[in-house]
Image: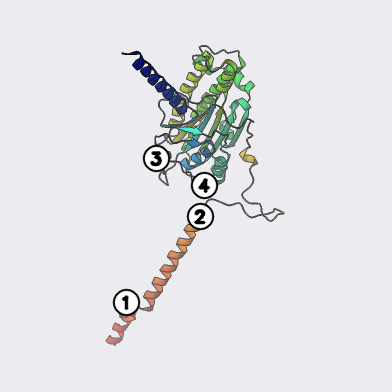
Amino acid sequence: MSLENRRRMEAVFTVALIFCSAFTSGVQGDSLTILQAPEYVSFQKGDWPISGEKIPDMVALTMGFSVQEDLSWPGLRAGPLFQRPRANVLVVVRGVDSLALPESVASYPLENPVPFTLDSVAETVHTLFAEDTPVVLQLAPSEERLYMLGKANAVFEDLPVTLQQIRARLSQDGSVLASLPLNSLSRNAEADLLFLSEVQVLHDITALLQRHRHLAKDHSPDLYSLELSGLEELGRRYGQDSSQYQDATAILANVLQKFGEDLFGLYGDSAVVEVVTVKNFEVPHTRKSRSILESKQISNPGSPYNLAYKYNFEYAVIFNIVLWLMIILALAVIVISYNLWNMDPGYDSIIYRMTNQKIRLD
């Protein structure tokens, strides 16, 4: 082979390597992974990106609720009207763009990773199923933020919330420290303890639900929203190439896989479990979450500003039911009136027919 041809081959290989590296870097990124889902909630496999601000709408549609704007995303297909999951579990993992979850249903790239909450979905659950007191749990251990609603107040009253409570839980019986392969992780470092505390919370949630299995058999849907930032702190403390970060990533992937399987089984294979992995949120400041208990009432008759009632998204359904029922009743009255008007008493009525026969006999 001549020197000129060899240089051409080297140039071709160089261009190919650059293209492959660019392609690979373009594929990797923040993602939405459907860890568990029943058969009647159909997620299509593909590389359709979804915006971070649309994830609450996607969660609402999987639970059978209506949204303000149509979700033009081909990853989720319309399911049966009268068959909806009993629970939806959303876990947000900060500090990593993807996790090795081989037994997932589908995975999609996440674009525009802005901070989001499921407050709108929680408010819908609270409004539609207020009498059934569903379980609504919103938890962020790193920020010591916990909002509970309905039966969650009784079930998760013993759940450790503050970092001090969770670290004390790590030293008690049944702690995850006895079963996890810590490897390079330390039991004394602050960043390591934060990550292990979040793993402990996931374990305690599963244990409490197994103790109260009756919650998964009622007719009201349950909602869980968890945010984990232990990996983000480990990456900031040791670096993403460190052994601590790599070991914690492998541990969290296994824990989330088992967490999803356990909750999916507790709800009788009728739960949707999603995992959102975000390296960094685009908004630099920390988002503020509000409790569902602080939400405004649906209507405020005593308002001094004479405001209108809050719009109910079930209005279209109720309107159609009332409209078509009135049309059917009106048509029924018209048909009955027409038949009575054109009825021949001598042939169509048994009363007049018997009377005529009696007159003839006399």
Amino acid tagged 2: Ala
Q: How many marks?
A: 4
Identify the mark nearer the N-term, 2 or 4: 4
Residue 178 image offset from top left, x and y in percent: 51, 14
**Label 1: which secondary element:** helix
Quarter of the view holding residue 351: bottom left
Q: Are marks 3 and 1 in contact (CB under 8 Å)?
A: no
**Label 4: which secondary element:** loop
Checking the image for residue 316, the label placed there is 2
What's the distance in space between the residues labelled 2 and 4, CA to CA?
A: 14 Å
Checking the image for residue 40, the label placed there is 3
Tell which of 357 and 342 is nearer to you. 342
Q: Is residue 352 above or below residue 27?
A: below
Q: Is residue 304 left or right of residue 293?
A: right
Identify the mark nearer the N-term, 4 or 3: 3
Determine which residue is flagged by label 4: 69
Identify the mark nearer the N-term, 4 or 1: 4
Q: Residue at x 37, y 19 (%)?
A: 8
Question: If the image is split into quadrants, where does the C terminus sit?
Answer: bottom left
Q: Is residue 204 above or below residue 77?
A: above
Tell which of 114 and 141 is nearer to you. 114
Determine which residue is flagged by label 1: 348
Select label 3 or label 1 by which is in front: 3
Residue 202 image offset from top left, x and y in percent: 52, 25
What's the distance in space between the residues labelled 4 and 1, CA to CA?
A: 56 Å
Q: Is residue 24 left or right of residue 244?
A: left
Checking the image for residue 280, the label placed there is none
Q: Are marks 3 and 2 in contact (CB under 8 Å)?
A: no
Q: Is residue 112 left or right of residue 297?
A: left
Name of the residue lying farthest toward the bottom? 362
Residue 221 image offset from top left, x and y in percent: 50, 40
Q: Residue at x 53, y 30 (%)?
A: 92
